[in-house]
Image: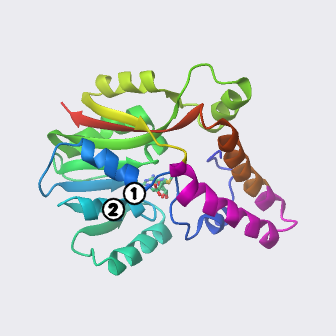
Amino acid sequence: MKMDDNIDWNIFFDIHKDLPRQGCGRDKYTEKAFNMIPPIINPNILDIGCGPGLQTIHLAKISSGKIIGIDIHQPFLDQLNKLVKKEKLIKKISTINKSMFNMDFQKNFFGIIWAEGSIFIIGFERGLKEWKKYLKPKVFLAVHEMTWLKHNPPKAIRDYWNDVYPDINTIEYNLEIVSKCGYNLIDYFPLPEDAWWKFYYNPLEERLQKMRIKYINIKNAFDLIESEQKEIDLYRKNYKWYGSVFFIMQKI
Ligand SMILES: C[S@@+](CC[C@H](N)C(=O)[O-])C[C@H]1O[C@@H](n2cnc3c(N)ncnc32)[C@H](O)[C@@H]1O
């Protein structure tokens, strides 16, 4: 879906309220990426665009570190804070309402920066460049980013993504950016299909059904609902062509 100024954000957040995740991902893939990082004791971890934070919770469980989750939508942070209490992780996770465009953390502070499905907001290259200063030397950045999985996608898919997210690139192109920005690649892997369905598209699609009834005859709501449905339908048919690819990197 195109995140532009024409969106009615009240309706957008009504659709997205209390969903388990706000993008694709699953604990087992967070863990797979985390396990690619060499062992690191008590790292300070920054989770950028943490949203409702299922990955934040899982990171807290599998690492010995302390995590700061940042996001600009307070209801997502509230959702995460509730989970933090429920899972008794108050000593390991804190949240801050802060924009990734406006970070003022101490330089060389973090041992790991994590961003699941959120680096697109600042842009893959800009994020890699700007976030680097907050990492200690030789430590780690893990993000997943919408990426073409095969060359020469059919025109309809290309047109859709050129409109919605024109910065979508190939794996090879993103790997060049990784090295250009001063990181060594540790590994990468595309999130499998189930990472899209189980905690994101399935609950979202169910929500869209309810929203069609709630917002019946309201044109801008209808347009928003159908544009989200279009994204889901496109993925259902074309998941082999694009997806979110985890890149696990080490600052040089
Ligand atoms: C696609 S969602 C991913 C959320 C979460 N990482 C997940 O996987 O469920 C992107 C998140 O980035 C947040 N976001 C949007 N603009 C932001 C900004 N400028 N700074 C920090 N977070 C932002 C949104 O509120 C949302 O929670």
> What kind of secondary structure does the magenta stretch mostly adopt?
helix
Horizontally, residue 97 falls left or right of residue 183, namely right
Quadrant where the image shows the C terminus: top left
The residue that appears at 70% across and 39% down in the rendered structure is 237
How did the renderer colour the structure? rainbow
Residue farthest left in this picture: 41
Alpha carbon separation for disc pair 1 and 2:
6 Å
Horizontally, residue 181 falls left or right of residue 229, namely left
The residue that appears at 42% across and 42% down in the rendered structure is 144
Horizontal and vertical percent for residue 48?
37, 53
Horizontal and vertical percent for residue 93?
27, 68
Task: From the viewer's side, name the closer residue of 225 and 98.
Answer: 225
Confirm whether the magenta stretch covers residue 87.
no
Query: Pointers 1 and 2 in contact (CB under 8 A)?
Result: yes
The residue that appears at 33% across and 55% down in the rendered structure is 47
Q: Name the residue carrying label 2.
A: 58
Q: Which residue type carries mark 1? A: Asp
Category of crowding for the residue at label 1, using alpha-carbon neighbours closer than 10 angstroms: few (below 14), some (14–19), many (at least 20): some
What is the tally of numbered marks visible in this picture? 2
Q: Which image quarter: residue 66?
A: bottom left
Mark 2 vs ligand 1: CB below 8 Å: no
Give the mark nearest the N terminus, 1 or 2: 1
Q: Which residue type carries mark 2? A: His
Q: Which residues are magenta?
A: 194-222
| Numbered label attached to residue 27 | 1
Confirm whether the magenta stretch covers residue 220.
yes
